[in-house]
Image (spheres, rainbow, N blue to C red):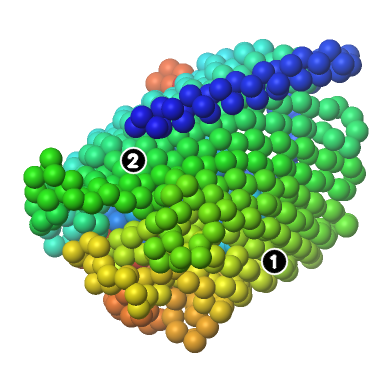
Amino acid sequence: MNYILIFYSKIMKKLSVIFLVLFLGMNANAQDAEIPRDTSKHLEEVKIIGIAKRKIETEMKMAVSVDEFLASSENISFIKRGAYAWEPLLNNMSSERSTLTIDGMHIFGACTDKMDPITSYVESNNLSTIDIKSGQEGSLHGATVGGSIDLKRKSTPFGLEKKFSGAYQTGFEFNNKQFYNLANASYAGDKFVADGSISFRKAGNYHDGNQNEIKHSQYNKFNTSLGLAYKISPLSSVRVDAIFDQAKDVGYPALPMDLWLSRAIITSASYKQLFEAGLVRIWDTKLYFNAIEHYMDDTTRPENLVHMDMPGWSTTYGLISKINLQEDRYSSEIQLNVYENISIAEMRMYPQDRSKRTMFAYSWPWVTTRFTGLSMNNSWEISDKSQLNFGGSLGLNYNYSKYVEFNRIFYPEAPQKKNRLLPGLHASYELNIDQFDFSIGTGYGHRAPSVSEAYGYYIYNSFDRYDYIGNPDLKNEISYEANASAGFKNEKMSIEAKANYFHIQNYIIGRILSLGSPMNYQSVGVKGYTSLDHAKLFNLTINTNYDILQHLHWKGVLNYARATDDKDGNLPFIRPLSYQTSLHFMHKGFSVQTSMNGDFKQDNYSPEYGEDQTPAYMIWNISGDYTFNIKNVKTALQVGAENIFNEYYSTYADWGNIPRMGRNIFTSLKFNF
Ligand SMILES: [Cu+2]
């Protein structure tokens, strides 16, 4: 904790210098800028490259967690280690292959066991939408292979007619006795805007389809956020934002240990300048800082003879500066990303008597990652029917391992510093002919290995029961990508098929090392992260909508994926053929929806990487809600049941085949004012 404080103060000093420079710069700008006559224009009226906004709720549930919301997206699947903090996989690739950001800010989990993907540090009531981009199209926020997931925070525009607005949501879920309270409020003045949120969730152990209690699956989460914006001139504004998140006593039933405490503070300050004429339309610059601390606890597990404390810290500060260009049929976004992260994880081993420490090691030996990158996305409307999108990114990635002696135990030649150049390119063409839409695209990009892949030291993986060792000299992963889609739409129905194919050179994965002996008494051996010559991934999604009646809608999604390594063996964690289908009926304030989802038998599993075959399963859900007004307060009441038939199942990506939740009745009440 001490060094974190020292670190904190160092960063604060650096940050204050940066802030000072920024504010001085801003003043100069404000004086130079000619103030336009037409002050009736509001900031929010300037359109940026359109992103379809999705509300943070699913068809089935109006009060969802961020994970449940992400799960409703067709190209996201999850590795689940329990009921909390699922690890999102985009295009069937692990989270190292995607960039996960909050409003473009880079944040890195502090857990060597991936207990804390950054999606666990936000709450559904402080987000407005989640922006998911596949493959190189997602390179705006930095080098990627799989794509990007950007969590967009709520940010109320200036000068709304309705000055105050807000929502309060409460609910109870019976299976795990989850009780939650979520509240958020906004004020939208002409010159000043504020957004605030607070939430509490507390859940007990859940029960599987055989009515068995899954021990160590409880969680407690507190999250709060505040955003303040001030308009300094008709066309410019400043904004500060902060999120604080704390999870306590979180069980991970699929892992040999739980979480005692995890805390995150995520802050940013930004300056936005709009331009009424000319090529440049928006210039948005943000400085950010975030710090995460993570303390695991295995004393809750009596089966552990030797205890290990494995705390972790991750601190990041960065800068994003983005401009939007617009000229007739051409628009463009150019973004500069700069960040520095330090990741620290310790491993301290104790016998039953905690006063006697027997071993100490750094599982992340104070690893610094410094990234600077410039990205560009362009779109050019060739005609009313066709559009060309193209862009690229160029990043410089620098790593430094402070205690490189840990890395040199397995790789004596390991360098302490490493520079990598990460280029990326992409292009796609969209064509619209009457009711048909087509697109075709391609991409090329590099990514650097993650901190664990490059510098991890004895990171125990309870899935295949190996200790993992990072290799600082791993080559960049290089992705060659092709994608295509075709769709048809009329007033009553729509159907769309999307496919992508990735050929990934130097695909990073763990392979058994002949040297070294396991450190953890549960582990069976040591694996080192190595590069396969290549791997191939293919994803196909078919999406259909049909309006049976005016108020009766049907929806269906089918997903297929296939992934192999360089010897045509299967890669792990690839979703088997899966489907989702739902029916939605509305009448006045009432609405009823039912959905079914499931996976077919997992044919292409990988025993080599610790997988066994997962059988098929099917889940049926139903929910009903009623919306009415109490004076000016819009009120919605919902009751529903998930897994009605109480099916006992686990999916291909449930860590250690941990069974999923059985029947769950949920209720929720929401007031919107
Ligand atoms: Cu952890």
Residue at 62% in and 13% down = 192
Q: Nearer the viewer, residue 68 or 62?
A: 68
Rendering coords of residue 615 (x, y %): 29, 76
Q: Nearer the viewer, residue 378 or 479?
A: 479
**Neighbourhood count class around disc 2 (C-alpha, 10 Å): few under 14, some 14–19, many 20 upward:** many
Give amino acid for label 1: Tyr
User: N-terminal of the two: label 1 or label 2?
Assistant: 2
Q: Nearer the viewer, residue 497 or 316?
A: 316
Locate the N terminus by quadrant. top left
Rendering coords of residue 523 (x, y %): 24, 67
Marks 1 and 2: which is nearer the front?
2
Q: Is residue 530 above or below residue 106?
A: below
* CB-based contact (under 8 Å), mark 1 and mark 2: no
Q: Nearer the viewer, residue 513 or 186?
A: 513
The circle on residue 444 is 1
Residue at 42% in and 55% down = 405
Regarding mark 2 in the picture, which secondary structure is present there? strand
For mark 2, what is the residue? 294
Q: Is residue 157 left or right of residue 181?
A: right
Rendering coords of residue 264 (x, y %): 41, 34
Q: Is mark 2 within 8 Å of ligand 1?
A: yes
Rendering coords of residue 667 (x, y %): 28, 39
Query: Can residue 587 be spotted in the picture?
Result: no
The circle on residue 168 is none
